[in-house]
Image: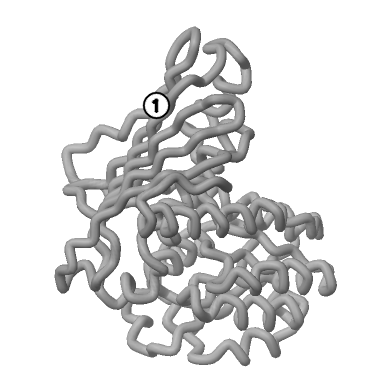
Amino acid sequence: MTTLTGAVIGYGRAGNIHVGNLVNIPGVRLKYIVDPVQGVKAGFPKGMEGCWAGSLDVVVNDAEVSFVVVCSPTDTHYEVISRCLQAGKHVFAEKPLCNETSQIALVYDEAERSNKLLFTAFNRRYDPKLMEAKAKFQSGECGEVLNGLMVSRDHPYPGKAYLEISGNLFKDCVVHDLDCMIWMLGENPCSVTATARSPGTERSAGMIENSQVFLKFPSGKLITLISSRVSLSYDQRVELYCAEGDIKVANPVSDVPLTFAQRYKESYINEMNAFLTQVRENCTVPNLSLEHSMFLDKLVKACHESVDSGKEVLV
């Protein structure tokens, strides 16, 4: 097996997860962990301190690096992704893909021009329990989905510095729920009605802390998404109520509080392996279409519009 040499850009919540997985995947050499703060080295896996780099320049100028994993703040994504693609690197990018809508098509264009893979990270698509639920729905054994519910309560509560650059709850968290439901049901919603609460506390950094999103689908399906930053343990549940049965994904039972990284440990590994398989096969077809990425961006904006107007927003 040929060894793939890579770099992780940004060592925050997501970067920590991906570094921990990459160092344990056979046939992968993690050469660089790029972060402007040198002190993050203290949290690196044992023996990886020498991988720290303070600038992206060292990565884009190193021909040995064939892939990068982008976990830096969202407002840096466009520049980082663009530079890495232009330098001939395959790119795995944490969501949100870009901060501005206009930038999304530009990075897709750059990937096509560079003939490199642009892989957008929506890890729930690779979770065994959710994959099983999707397969059950697609089998038709439970009939048509009539109503559905997804509960996503985050844990631990993120720090203020993270919240200030997160893009708010809809862009940071609810977008996972939106993508997951579209992926599971194979259908885009036609309208969004959202409500949200921002407590205005120092902890929340002025961001939304709780939300509820109601989705209508052209087929008649009605789906509710409940999201919150507040929970004593990570809480993720899916319930699809069908004409001939139910499809449910329960929250894992644990005697100690769960974090999102622990709940989705398998999905993060499976997701990274899917990306690396495409890199090895030099398959440059994006895992998500430009149209889907643009639609998710539209849905996030529709959630905010609905909160502000108090009305249903057609999408």
Neighbour class for label 1 at 10 Å: few (<14), some, many (≥20)? some
Secondary structure at badge 1 equals strand
Which colour assignment does the render follow?
Answer: one colour
Residue found 62% across the figure and 35% down from its top: 187
Q: Which residue is under mark 1? A: 239
Left or right position of 112 against 66: right
Q: Quadrant of residue 293?
A: bottom right
Residue found 49% across the figure and 91% down from its top: 54
Q: Nearer the viewer, residue 293 or 195?
A: 195
Left or right position of 47 against 63: left
Image position of 56 with respect to 194: above or below: below
Image position of 168 with respect to 269: above or below: below
Q: Does the image show residue 267?
A: no
> Which x, y percent locates residue 203?
17, 69
Residue placed farthest to the top in the image?
244
> Which x, y percent locates residue 290?
71, 57
> Which x, y percent locates residue 237?
35, 34
Q: Does the image show residue 193?
A: yes
Image position of 247 with respect to 90: above or below: above
Q: Which kind of residue does numbered mark 1 sit on?
A: Glu
The quarter of the rendered structure image containing the N terminus is bottom right
Residue found 51% across the figure and 50% down from its top: 123
> Which x, y percent locates residue 7?
58, 75
Residue found 44% across the figure and 24% down from its top: 147
Q: Nearer the viewer, residue 40 or 210?
A: 210
Q: Quadrant of residue 240?
A: top left
